[in-house]
Amino acid sequence: MQRIGVFVCWCGSNIASTVDVKKVAEVLKAEPGVVISENYQYMCSENGQALIRNAIKEHSLTGIVVCSCSPRMHEATFRRTAESAGLNPYMVEIANIREQCSWIHKDMEEATEKAIILGRSAIAKLKLNAPLTSGESAVVKRALVIGGGIAGIQSALDIAEAGFEVDIVETSPTIGGNMAKLDKTFPTLDCAACILTPKMVDCAQNEKIDILTYSEVESVKGFVGNFKVQIRKKARFVDEKKCTGCGECMQKCPSKKGLNDFNMGLNTRPAIYIPFAQAIPNVAVIDPEQCLKLKNGKCGLCAMKCNVNAIDYTQKDEIIEREYGAIVVATGYKPISLENFNEYGYSQYKDVVTSLELERLMNAAGPSEGHLVRPSDHKEPKVITFIQCVGSRDTSGCGKPYCSKICCMYTAKHAMLIREKYPDTEVHVFYIDVRTPGKNYDEFFRRAVEQYGVDYVKGMVGKVYEENGKLMVQGADLINNEQVVIPSDLVVLAAAIEPSPTVRKIATMVTASIDTNNFLTEAHAKLRPVESPTAGIFLSGVCQGPKDIPETVSQASACAAKVIGLLAKDKLKCNASVAHSDETLCSGCSVCANVCPYGAITYVDKEFRLGGGKTELRRVASVNPAVCQGCGACTVTCPSGAMDLKGFTTGQIMAEVDAICKR
Amino acid sequence: MQKLNELALEKAKTLLANGTVARVLGWKKGELGYDLEPAVFYSESDLEGFIYNAFSGANLSKYLIEESKKEGKVLVFLKPCDSYSFNQLVKEHRIVKENVYTVGIECQGKLDVKKLKEKGIEIVDGVIENVDDVTVISLGKEYNFVKEEVLLGKCSVCEKHLLSYDEVISLHDKRTPKLDRFEIVKKLEAMTADERYAFWKGELSKCIRCNACRNVCPACNCLKCVFDNDASGIASKANSDSFEEKLFHIIRAFHVAGRCTDCGECSRVCPQAIPLHLLNRKFISDINRLYGEFQAGEDDVTKGPLTAYTTGDAEPSEVFGGNK
Amino acid sequence: MDKLEQVKLVKERSGTDARKCMKCGKCSGRCPAYNEMDVKPHQFVSYIEKGDIDKLLNSKSLYTCLSCFACVERCPRGVAPANVIEAVRQEVIRVQGENKIQAEKVPEMIDETIPQQLLVSMFRKLNK
Amino acid sequence: MQEIKKDYKPLIVAFCCNWCSYAGADLAGSSRLSYPAEVKIIRVPCSCRVNPTFILKAFQRGADGVIICGCHPGDCHYTSGNYFARRRMSLLFSMLDYLGIERERTRVEWVSAAEGAKFSAVMNDFAKTVTELGENKRLEDLRCKN
Amino acid sequence: MKKISCENLSKLYSEIASLQELYLPVKESGVTNYKKYENGAEVDIKTLKTVKSAKDFFFPQTEDMMEFKVNGKNIEINDARKVANPFVIFGVRACDLKSFDILDKVFLQEPVDTMYKAKREASTIITLACNNPEQTCFCKTFGIDASNPAGDISAIIVNGEMLFEAKTEKGAELLNKLTCLEDAGDTDADAERAEIVKKSENLPFANLNLDEFKGENLMKLFDRPEWAELSKACLGCGTCTFVCPTCQCFDIRDFITNEGVRRFRCWDSCMYSEFTKMAAENPRKTQLQRYRQRFMHKLVYFPQNNDGVYGCVGCGRCVQKCPQNLNIIKVIKKLGGKNND
């Protein structure tokens, strides 16, 4: 006979204000099998947990039902509570009476009734629970970091620091990411290269870190602690081990008309190139679309010029297979395409640029070597107008509904830097709001206004048009209640940022969930912000949501800490909720293996007693509990019902259905 | 056609005699001329009861689950439709293929005893079968029928052909069916929901839950059916409520979906003449329409449509097609 | 009519949710008739949200708005200021005797450069 | 068409996958986006865990509508579970329709963990649809009704 | 004797139905079964054998027995047996009528099955002679006269008229109430009956030899090797048992309702693999054992315990309905004795 304890949580007023918690506890106490039913203000608090622990011991409970918040919130907490009182942690069921009841219903009577039904349903399920124990699997002590921007670099360095091996896979020929393109960084105005390049060098020199640039993740199989990953190392046509990065080849290459991605396409580069001077690895790469030798076989100048014979036109893509215990996704961001914003004339006028392009224009290593000139005629602009929120906070469908978070600060930075270097330049900024939460951020912005005299106009720009060689920026000045037109030489658009386009593919491969904006979803916004809901997958940097550099670096380190915590374990407790085949029912038909995404099901010939001394050899399914992740696909495909899922058995789910449908 | 019987008998005798097989799975003569029963023959004298004629409608493949596990090889005669079931069972590892000697045998459709009874024939003294017509001799009288009048429902729309076997006995090309297999399914789909409900209510309320459909079905080969297993939560012995009629037939059809070869045995054996094959055919027709043409049992390796998917599959909200 | 009712009607007819406005002013930044308007496009949205309809009913902007819908096109939040203006205008001209143009007087306004379309839309906008 | 009682409230069973839709329901809760209390959620690891018998069983027990919610195709936590669920439910729903059972009583929706608003909207809409259909008569079990 | 023209039978049905509930063979969705008479029903008295036999009236396929209402931790037990209202069955053939005797031996013996008894007493049975017995009929083997079944009222069709004769008081009472009937006067009933007897005599299985099926042969019969061959094709379905008018096995099962538990009984079949499943063991593991049980019961055990009355009435339903054409005739021919060919 089961002895069930029911614990109804008030969650302060979160539940208690709409659900009559005392009544719920009282009604559920009358359910067959329930021996004690309590209510308390905060079940998850130490006192609440103590109450549960005491009840388990005092009443020799065989299982408990906690009516509280979502199991996604505190199921683990209460399982630990139960375990500490000597109960199997899987003899705990949660009735979600907060997120799925008190928070969405207003009528007390209705909500209370529903809470009781949800409680009954949990009791019905619990009655069929069986104590579960989880198996164990070994952990591969190596991490994969997907993306070599500042997020990936920081995570990799921290993981390597703890003594674990890390591979960085980066699609472009160098690590560094977007940060490498920046000139200065807010709010301290130190040079991006000065703080980033030492970290890049650290990566290159760290024995534990293997950098795979110009590479892409091809497939991910396996599960936490045991991922099997295929990485495509694209042919770069230059032997990485031989190339010294002398740059001789770049000089000689006759095909020099390639757009320089690193400079946001503001100038050109040769077909064989090193993205920038401090690139890691400092190794050339040939753009096969542009190289004359690769395109039509005529040229080969670079190979002739190369002193170390590093050029290899026959190089092929290479597939590398490695095993990892953990995967960090750090795929970063890119500015959105501005094709939906014709009103700002980005595609019409050369002198309408994005902020990231401005970074390159102002960067000493950029196309104009740090002299701020406008792209059209290379003259110094005298009036510069910034437009904020281009595509951010846009629910019309043209842009992104979210705030890109970094634009207010970098625009203040740009305005300030311009006013400092070119004091006779007029700078206007059209803004909706200036958002500067962060240490020393608002002070920074105020400096731009107060110390550098940047003109902030509260209002948005309606259109940009050309008149007499000037870019006329027409917008509203909501404070002065007038429409203004500012003749400008350069217009800078703070384009919204979006997750890197590769993230969807990666998310699918690692089965991480993704939100409507293509940002990866964290397991919990507050409790598990750097983990994906998929075990073993961690999130670093902007792939999870817009972030500036300080935030990215701290998240990357947090992420590394989680990875280290995982890799430090020799064995992982497996999921206890795994499929299980009842061999007396299994006819070995193989349909279950056909639907198993993890290859967890194999078949064995097993001897069964038939009675009367006879035996029979029968083919039956066998589930590897270390590999099974507990999706349950097999249970439904099995016609005889031989396959069941522990923790979510057919019986349990049907009992829940029955309980819910009782009117 | 009578020649087929002689050839089959000859084949069985030879293979038994030369030790290729230890026994023969075939059809045995009955008491009324039409009541053939599946049987295993061990010797030449046993084979006196053997017959292959217009009443050899029973699908023998399911018996091989047991027979192929016994010692020695078993010879089986497989009509085209039976061989699809055979392949499907091999695919599901239910038949030990190495222990079976398969002989494909020509079939031009088998006769429906119920239809003959409606024509006044209660006992059969002899039958002369041609490709397109058949003459039945009963109590001294001869009755000639065009095949369509008296064929089993499953045979009148059969498009199946002989697959691959150890040997084949065939004298004529397969006759092409004159009816469309999905005609009635389409007709039902074209009805209103109320009309469909009324139709199925009439049919399914006849069900006496004798399990003949399930037990004869080669796809229903579970060691223990969920409906017999109290732990399954849906076990039941009788339709105590009209709900249970539906539950049983929906779940049964669902469990064999993508595995059902459309052999038609379910409808042949139903004592209450419920057109059960129309449920399976609905699934087949949906599968063909939504996921591409698929014939279960065409081979013994291809994954079934319910254990496969494509990322662009239709959404459940858009599967209803043209029906009302 | 009750003021509250009138505000509700205008909101309904405009089909726009003024609460979605984030007060960026892009509508006014884009408006080609901005300088002719006493109440600006963004203010229409703001006033209607606050329930202050009197200012709008008496506004000159009702007749200076070109109905070019640039404000609607540009709004990043899917708010439609022009629809609000249109809805308020309907409130005014639907009242008996509030037609702003008499058909008899049209011929004297016509010159060759006025497109037919303009006449039609003028009637639609200014008359019941 | 049956007559619908004035204060008729349907009973709706929603099977939600743990990773996306159940989290979406939680988000609807934490965003205070209401939907009728008649909707009761059963947590399953994945939409592919939903056996057709659960759905029929729910109807037998007195449910008037059953909805299955899973991750969007391509986003399944288990890679492919919802693809299998999609095929199974497509065929099952089509079969129910073929038997003349109101097709509006069953539904599959893909709701991600980020779509609290969608979850609430879907449940409101489904509850409305089922309310309009009235009591489930064609898949009921009289023994479960009093 | 009373009579009515066969053309006016619907008047008769309406009149009986206006007095009591009337059940009779009705063709629905292509098959004929006993149904409650309703206006416009397609009554089918041509078909000799309804798919399901007439035993359903007294021993229906499912039947509620009791109900447990669970309220919190309390359980309340209620009687769920239905009250049997008087009803009339029309068109019962001689074989089915005989089956009632056999069922009576089972259900009316102490302890009496109250559910069965109540319905049995509530019934008025109108039998109908078989003008055209079928080839699969072998009631004569069991000494049944298809031409003259009794019941409460016996009916026979002669020259396009249906003639009625009361056989019991209950029957006479009903017959007297029926205004649509007229007095029959002199009839050719006897001649028609003689004709039927002659037809029955000429049926292929009219005189099967049952000599071997005797109590003293029990063990010998049990061990006959032919059972293997006879049962080989058996699918283990319940068709034969469910269409059989004399099979009387049932199972008692619980259904969990929203309020508690409803306990009901329903037909079971000895052909089912789990028929004899018990906690420790299932003594009949093979289909051969189960198949043998069914026929040993009908032909040996039952007569042994019931003064030689066989548990078969020769209706031939199983002969027609077995999916794989196994049937009792094949068993009798193989094991019943000489001259069975």
Image: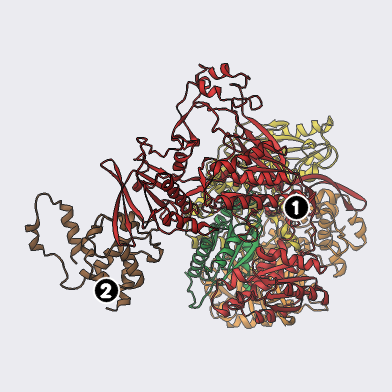
* Quadrant in which the C terminus of chain A is drawn: bottom right
Q: Can you identify the residue that label 2 sits on?
A: C54
Which chain has been coloured yellow in this picture?
B
Up-down relation of residue C89 to residue A142 (above or below): below
Chain A: colour as depicted: red
Up-down relation of residue A168 to residue E124 (above or below): above
Q: Are marks 1 and 2 in contact (CB under 8 Å)?
A: no
Q: Can you identify the residue that label 1 sits on?
A: E235
Which chain has been coloured green in this picture?
D
At a point 69% along the width and 31% down the height, the residue shown is B168
Hey, which quadrant is residue E49 in on the image?
bottom right
What secondary structure is marked by label 1?
loop
Which chain has been coloured orange in this picture?
E
Do we see residue E188 in this rendering? no
What secondary structure is marked by label 2?
helix
Q: How is the image coloured?
A: by chain
Chain C: colour as depicted: brown
Q: Chain of mark 1?
A: E
Q: Is residue E68 left or right of residue B257?
A: right
* Quadrant in which the N terminus of chain A is drawn: bottom right
Q: From the viewer's side, name the closer residue of A162 and E16.
A: A162
